[in-house]
Amino acid sequence: MKKITRLGLSALCGSLAMASAANAGDISVTGSAEITYLTVDGNTTGHPFGMKSNLGFSGSGELDGGQKVALTIDNTDKSAFSAASIALTTNNIGTIKLSNGSGADLGDYDDKAPTAWEEAWDGGQGATTDKISGVASSTNINWVSPATTGKIMGGTKLILAYAPRNNATQQNDKTASGDTGTTGKGLDIILDLRSGKKLSGFLGYSTTDRHGNDLKGHDHTKPDGNKEEAVIGLNYKLGPFSMGYQHSAEDLKAQGNGSSAENDMYLNKSWGVAMNINGGLSVSYGEATSNQIFTAVTNGAGANKFTKKRKQKSKAYNAAYTIGGVTAKWSSTETKNAAYSEGSDKEATLLSLGIAF
């Protein structure tokens, strides 16, 4: 990262009363740009070229009491705002962060299987894979505990993330979401496990209040049925090899009628194996399976209910080669039942050339 200038962090975080005592902090900028070429099912219909970019700013400083404060802002394609956070870190209680799309939450654990580039379901083939997210897409406040010490479980952390309204909304300043909609508060609980440098794992759970009708006039402490998500996974490194496996579940408790689906549930699993061949070249193979389970209803609400299951399966080969700040990537993916329906199979080949500073 290139240091641009120095400024008082209190000017950036004026809403934090304690920031008025901050020492001068640093602000840095990072950026990247990537060009991609995509073919789906062997065709290049439409425009096969694409481009994405990212411009990020981060500021940090230290308070008189030794606490550290940090600000991050990310701008993605066409310099549009994508995420921001303000964090306070202490030696005793860990890190507390207010986040708009960049926090520590269950969404960070949707697929942690090792890969040289993309996940098996995200190689441009258009798979509509349902994934756990927790409060990731909503403005939330999260806490990361100090890491444990010791040879056996050193580095283990507890993570909590809370959104007063987990409605996939990122709030601007001086605004508040109205008392409407069917989604209430959300809470993520994650245990990020470490055991030496080779073995790591994670356990996570999320719950979000769900209401059958509009929230207005309802008792928010008595939801009609909470959305629940859970994940468990394990990763292991051995020399140049890394491997990982995980299971996740999402119970939407959606209430349908007529020909709609009721009580959608998704059971996902993924695994991957990656290898660093040398300092710049890495390759990987991974698979992901997603099972959609729901109760179908025909001939009117509540009539002729029957349980259905739809299976989606993806696999991917990835390779990446880096020279300095330039990286070339290749991905070949295949998904059966990409839209959770028969006949929606997809194959894709994706090429990428990117630079970063």
Image: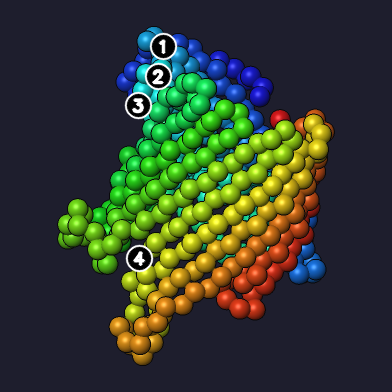
Mark 2 closeness class: few <14, some 14–19, many ≥20 residues within 10 Å: some
Name which residue lies at 62% across and 72% down: 337
Callout 1 amino acid: Gly
Task: Tell me which numbered mark, 2 or 1, is placed earlier along the sequence.
Answer: 1
Task: Tell me which numbered mark, 4 or 1, is placed earlier along the sequence.
Answer: 1
Instruction: Check disc 1 and report the residue beneath it.
Output: 66
| Of the two numbered discs 4 and 1 in the rendering, the one whose residue sits closer to the viewer | 4
Name which residue lies at 58% across and 45% down: 112
How far is mark 2 from mark 1, CA to CA? 7 Å
Callout 4 amino acid: Lys
- Asked if the residue under mark 1 is in contact with the one under mark 2, i.e. CB atoms within 8 Å, the reply is yes
Instruction: Check disc 4 and report the residue beneath it.
Output: 253
Residue 98 appears anywhere in the view: no
Instruction: Check disc 2 and report the residue beneath it.
Output: 90
The one of 111 and 202 positioned closer to us in this rendering: 202
| Of the two numbered discs 3 and 1 in the rendering, the one whose residue sits closer to the viewer | 1
Give the quadrant of residue 46: bottom right
